[in-house]
Amino acid sequence: MPPDLLRAGSLEIGLGLVLLAVFVLNLCARGADRRWLALVATAGVGAVGVLSLLVPPVPPAPGAMFVLDGLAIFAKRLFLCATFVGLLAGLSQPAATGRRAGEYHVLLLASLLGMFVLASARDLILLFVAFELMSIPLYVLAGFAKREATAVEAALKFFLVGSVSSAVMAYGLSFVYGAAGSTDLGRVARAFAAGDPLLLLGLLAAFAGFAFKIAAFPFHMWVPDTYEAASTPFVAWLSVAPKAAGFVAIFRVYFEGVGDAARLWIPVAAGLATLTIVAGNLMALPQQNTKRLLAYSGIAHIGYMLVGVAAASPMGTAMVLFYLVAYVFGNMGAFLVVEALARAEGSEATAAFRGLAQRSPLLALAMLLFLLSLGGIPFVAGFWAKLYVFWAAAAAGLYWLVLLGAVLTVVALFYYLLVARRMYIEPPERSGRVPLPGTLALAILLCAVGVVVLGVYPKPVVMAALRVAAPLF
């Protein structure tokens, strides 16, 4: 294997070894308690995360199908961070520690491997294969609790909608190949800059498939049921990592190398952002189940990220990347607090948060930080994330979209602060502290620290995002 290719695939090789180790150890394992397999997977992901900090970008060969540039490294570090937090939170969960722990972690690591390949893909075939490698394990994990009818139903809906979206994406990519005469994204970009209408049609069809992966409206149908039925640590990870992979793929296909032709996507992205922000926020308002509330809230956040995509500029792309980092900590943290409360109360309803500040003040404080970040209140991570994507859109002249986003941000504060009101104003229904397993508490703490640190000092991540976004244009 050539040295440059070996270096470019070093993170995939490392993650593949971790996956293989978990698979083999599971075959050799005895007994019902397999918590140690979860520890192996978590430690392995942490080790690959450390390796990702040491791996430099590798100059791509001409016509390379697989690259390790700044964008790929940034995305893979983000995936690893989200996966480590999700695995850490799941260490006390029966699905991650029981007899099927090996299956659970092999599937999750396989999906993560698909995200890795997707972030580095510079070829249409490799891009599609990576999408499927990422997606198929997610369908299984969504219905992992196979004895629960709701989980099976949600997984089936996820699978059916995902299969249709993959078919539409493949159909669109076939038009792209027919028009460009190549599966290489560099040649596709040059053909798009030339203005081939058949290529434009293919990219529009493929965009519908991408919209499903990031759960933009109206391709969001699988989100609420899947989030409500699946295990919460998995949902916390599902809500951020695959969506980040989808946005990276959008940047690769629609922005990288096309030059000024990227501006052709402004109306499409702006229209999709408008629909997604409005629908996500309005559908979140009547929700009484906290996981469904966060599901619709997540759809709205995808709309805010699409505001950055609509800017079609290096700054807009960079601010979407920063938004994704802030979203990992804020959204995952909120889901993990819901998991802690659901274990104690047996309920995921917003009513279960009543009086939480009196029972477990630190847990309530963490949830408040996550809600403030998701709502875009100064000075936590989500404030800078929204400010920067609005700034990028304003620089592109999309003032109406910025105004719409700002108004709907105020609407979102209503349902976020409703949960805060239950925690701090309403009396508790029962006394006693909320029990919190050590690993889950550590995962929540990591998310809270991330939200606060990025809110106080966002500059390093912002500058890193700007550095990796600039070469795309």
Image (cartoon, rainbow, N blue to C red):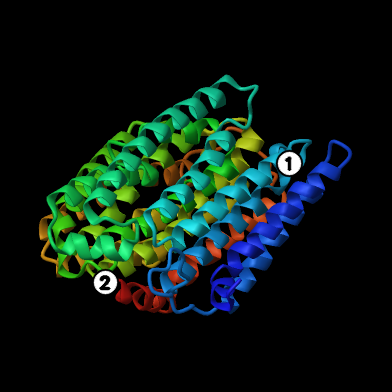
Residue at 43 percent across and 57 percent down: it is 327
Q: Quadrant of residue 293?
A: top left
> Which residue type carries mark 2?
Met
Residue 128 screen position, x and y as percent = 42, 48
Q: In what element is the residue under mark 2?
A: helix
> Which residue type carries mark 1?
Ala
Q: Nearer the viewer, residue 13 or 389?
A: 13
Disc tally is 2
Quadrant position of the N terminus in the picture: bottom right
Residue 19 screen position, x and y as percent = 68, 53
Using residue 29 as the reference point, say whether residue 232 is left or right of it.
left
Q: Nearer the viewer, residue 376 or 272?
A: 272
Q: Earlier in the sequence, mark 2 or mark 1?
A: 1
Residue 394 in the image: above or below residue 366: below
Residue at 31 percent across and 47 percent down: it is 173
Residue 263 screen position, x and y as percent = 15, 62
Residue lying at the far front of the rendered structure: 181
Q: Which residue is mark 1?
A: 101
Q: Few, some or many C-alpha atoms within 10 Å of disc 2 (few <14, some 14-19, many ≥20)?
A: many
Q: Tell me the distance, in whole angstroms, between the alpha carbons under discs 2 and 1.
A: 42 Å
As drawn, the label of residue 315 is 2
**Is residue 369 in sight in this rendering?**
no
